Image (cartoon, helix red, strand yellow):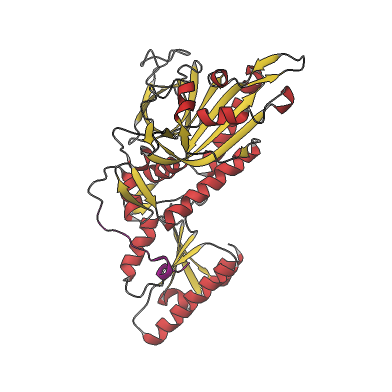
Amino acid sequence: MKASDLHLKTLKEVPKDESAINAQLLIRAGFIEKLTSGVYNFLPLGLKVIYKIEDIIRTEMNNLGGEEILMAALQPQKNWEQTKRWKTFNALLKVKSQYEQWYALGPTHEEVVTPLAKQFVLSYKDLPLYLYQIQTKFRDEPRPKSGLLRTREFIMKDLYSFHRDEKDLDSYYEKVKKGYFKIYAQLELPVMMVEASGGTFSKYSHEFQTITESGEDTIYHCSHCGFTQNAEIIENKKQCPHCKHQLEKLKGIEVGNIFKLKDKYAQPFGLTYIDFHGHKRIVMMGCYGLGVSRLMGALAEVSHDQHGLIWPAAVAPFKYYLLPVLSGDKKLDQSIKKATTDLYQDLIKQKVEVLYDDRQDVSTGEKLNDADLLGVPYRLIISSRTIKNKSVEIKNRKTGLIKTIKIKTFLKNI
């Protein structure tokens, strides 16, 4: 893509109403735009990142046997009353139609997926069942903060599993844990799995936390045996309950959570199946959440420097940021422009994602700054220095390493 077609607009100044690094950088780089408190628009570059994160998640959900669906965001009041959460779910965003009907804008989908599963599950032969979706959700947060990490509207993947018994639920739960770590590995996002309160569902749920000083959550970790718990449930914050070693206090960003719901929602909706012996039994359920837009914010929060974003290659909007550095010599500059355009065309032919900064009214200095701000993994420069031996200068955004290589060699080894 050419930058002139993208209508790229970046900001030099930090947005005054944003204190979170992720929001500051994403807005400055033109990935998102703030509509109001806790609500953001995703612009072309931001949407490219979102789609790539979704693709990584979708692949792993499919590998786990998930069937993708898309459930309604507008949920009837009666479903929430059936689970007794209409008045107790504090962040539930409620809307009333002109016909005096109340709805919830879905913050989660247990109240929808459980009765839906009754259409699929009749006997033991229909289990297990794994349904997931990637969808926009809503929560009436009293104080949205931390950019994309705590918003009123967000994109989320939620997977729901349905089982014959707790043994099968436990087995699948362990598979999902491994699947989540595969997702984070592709995102180059280091995470720790943390025990958290299971509420009314089970003794523990599990959160996946990426450690950073700017994190909202406090967790306690034992470097000796690996014990890790959220601050809300830990009893002794100084000593590990398993090996008695001293606990380390850390800050983290939650980037995923999983629960064993068991029969919490199957009971009120009467989700049952007929077993091998002809007996009616209650279905066991699990829930596995992963915030897509939150992941984008977390990546920006933990992977940046003073110059801008540093995207992992798997989700970067482009692999290369290509620009010519002109000399002022008309004849030489014609050669530089031609070589840059030719390289751009060669990359396009090889289906490589490249942003060609062909803007005429922007200085070279501004282009170099934008290359760093946007966080594209590799910057390519053709200049008077490289044109002489038909080379291109390559800078690794993450390491800062710069090398010059013949263009033909570069194209052969992409």
Q: Quadrant of residue 99?
A: top left
Viewer-proximal residue, 179 or 371?
179
**In this view, which residue lies farthest toward the front?**
99
Q: Main secondary structure of the magenta part?
A: loop
Q: Quadrant of residue 31?
A: bottom left
Viewer-proximal residue, 186 or 273?
273
Q: Position of residue 174 (x, y in %)?
A: 60, 26
Is residue 10 one of those drawn in magenta?
A: yes
Q: Position of residue 155 (x, y in %)?
A: 45, 42
Write the residue at 41% across / 77% down. Answer: 384
**In this view, which residue lies farthest toward the bottom?**
331
Viewer-proximal residue, 290 or 364?
290
Q: Is residue 5 above or below residue 113?
A: below
Q: Is residue 412 above or below residue 276?
A: below
Q: Which residues are magenta?
A: 1-14
Position of the C terminus by quadrant: bottom right
Q: Position of residue 134 (x, y in %)?
A: 52, 41
Q: Quadrant of residue 364?
A: bottom left
Viewer-proximal residue, 125 or 386?
125
Q: Position of residue 7 (x, y in %)?
A: 38, 66
Q: Is residue 319 left or right of residue 91?
A: right
Is residue 199 one of those drawn in magenta?
A: no
Does the image show residue 22? no
